[in-house]
Image (cartoon, grey):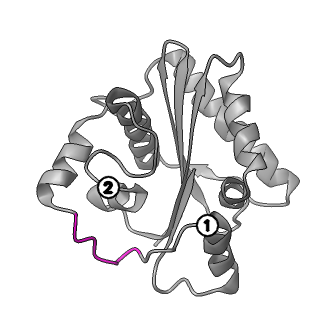
């Protein structure tokens, strides 16, 4: 699943095409969200791993592998690699954790917040942001399975191959043989 947001100044045809490919309407970074309240923001950000670190060294290795593979794909398409941003890692990890803990899978959390809301809640300004998520159960190579699925999906693929994206955060949560993946893509403000 994917979600792409544009800030008001982002008006190029390429960015508009990304929104179209993502099959979701673009939202500006400064567009008000009437459902957001201080209470829902606090609830959404309160439930996450305490320090924002990877769940374990095994999971940290999986996160690094996922980013390395995504950057190889970008390189094969003559795109610059994505740079890791620790704040985006923390947001992605927290979201994968919450999807697992609360038993949902989608771009909106239990409080109705999406990726743009999560970034705003952390005080992060962006010109453009998108999110890919995946859930894998019983796969021998969950990272490769997630990437293969994303590359077969027009919208996910577009997020991975959007040249304007410069930064990323990756979060994986493992619960037995169930893996939740979140990758946030961002072009900073």
Q: Which residue is mark 1?
A: 23
| Magenta span main SS | loop
Instruction: Check residue 132 for magenta coloring.
Output: no
Labels 1 and 2 touching (C-beta < 8 A): no
View extreme (left): residue: 39
| Whole-number angstrom distance, CA of label 1 to CA of label 2 | 19 Å
Q: Earlier in the sequence, mark 1 or mark 2?
A: 1
Q: Is residue 161 above or below residue 61?
A: below
Q: Which residue is more in the foreground, 180 or 93?
A: 180
The spot of residue 166 in percent (x, y) is 61, 61
The spot of residue 57 in percent (x, y) is 52, 17
Left or right for 41, reference 96: left
Mark 2: few/some/many CA within 10 Å (<14, 14-19, 20+): some
Q: Is residue 136 above or below residue 84?
A: above
The stretch of residues the image draws in magenta is 29-35
Q: Secondary structure at mark 1?
A: loop
Mark 1: few/some/many CA within 10 Å (<14, 14-19, 20+): some
Instruction: Check residue 31 for magenta coloring.
Output: yes
Q: Which residue is mark 2?
A: 113
Whether residue 95 is visible? yes
Q: Is residue 75 above or below residue 93?
A: below
Left or right for 47, reference 179: left
Left or right for 107, reference 65: left
Q: Secondary structure at mark 2?
A: loop
Residue drawn where x is 54% and y is 83% of the image: 10
């Amino acid at each position: 699943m994917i979600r792409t947001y544009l800030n008001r100044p982002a008006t190029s045809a390429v960015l508009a095409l990304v929104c179209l490919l993502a099959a979701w309407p673009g939202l500006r970074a400064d567009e008000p969200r009437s459902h957001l309240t201080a209470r829902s923001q606090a609830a959404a950000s309160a439930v996450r791993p305490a320090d924002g670190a990877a769940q374990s060294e095994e999971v940290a290795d999986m996160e690094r592998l996922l980013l390395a593979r995504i950057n190889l794909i970008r390189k094969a398409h003559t795109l610059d690699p994505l740079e890791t941003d620790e704040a985006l890692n923390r947001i992605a990890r927290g979201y994968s954790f919450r999807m697992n803990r609360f038993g949902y899978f989608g771009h909106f959390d239990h409080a109705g917040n999406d990726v743009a809301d999560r970034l705003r809640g952390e005080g992060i300004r962006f010109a453009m942001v998108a999110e890919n998520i995946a859930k894998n159960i019983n796969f021998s190579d969950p990272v490769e399975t997630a990437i293969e699925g994303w590359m077969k999906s027009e919208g996910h693929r577009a997020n991975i191959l959007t040249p304007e994206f410069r930064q990323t955060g990756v979060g994986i949560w493992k619960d037995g043989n169930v893996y939740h993946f979140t990758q946030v893509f961002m072009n900073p403000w």
